[in-house]
Image (cartoon, rainbow, N blue to C red):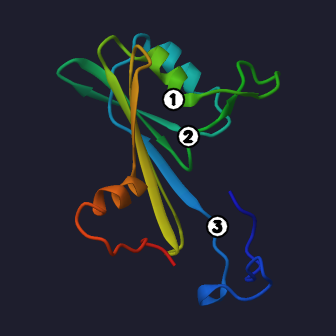
Amino acid sequence: MGSASTGLNEAGGKGKAGIVANYVSQTRTNYFKVKDPEAFKAWCKTWITDMDVVPGSGEDGELYTILIPGSPPDARRDDPETEWFEADFIEELAEHLEEEWVAVIMQIGHEKQRYVGGYAVAINSRGDHQTVNLDDIYVTAKELGEHITRAEY
């Protein structure tokens, strides 16, 4: 995350529209089933970023989704009295999933209208995962024509 805007770009000049913007992102998951709901909710509270754990229900019983203001967290602690340590949110989430369930984590972000980005990761209870990045569209677009510009300024 960036700091407060000064209105100047790195070269000391004014940026487009006269301001320098911060990157802003949001993350959410699909609804998925967990092995132990109480252990899962307690684990969610150990992360450096506050997140909302929202229960839902489906044919398979109680399901959960996670809403995160910003990017997925990268640090947690097991006890409020201990130091933060680096951790992989997505890999650890897999440990909580019920067998054969898949969590899909989607993150989008933007820096004003300068650029937008996003990705999604699908991970199962065994830790197998697949990732899709919005920037991959430029590789796919090459199949359609040779003149492609990036959606940014």
Q: Residue at x 35, y 56 (%)?
A: 139
For disc 3, the marked residue is: 22
Where is residue 18? Give x, y as percent: 65, 89
Height in image: 39 above or below 20? above
Mark 3: amino acid: Asn
Secondary element type, mark 1: helix
Can residue 105 be seen from the camera position used here? Answer: no
Residue annotated with mark 2: 72
Looking at this view, name the residue that lies furthest to the front. Answer: 146
Q: CA distance from mark 1 to mark 2?
A: 8 Å
Residue at image coords 43%, 71%? 150
Vertical placement of 113 versus 73: above or below? below
Numbered tag placed on residue 90 in the rendering? 1
First in sequence: mark 3 or mark 1?
A: 3
Amino acid type, residue under disc 2 in the picture: Pro
Which label sits on residue 61? none
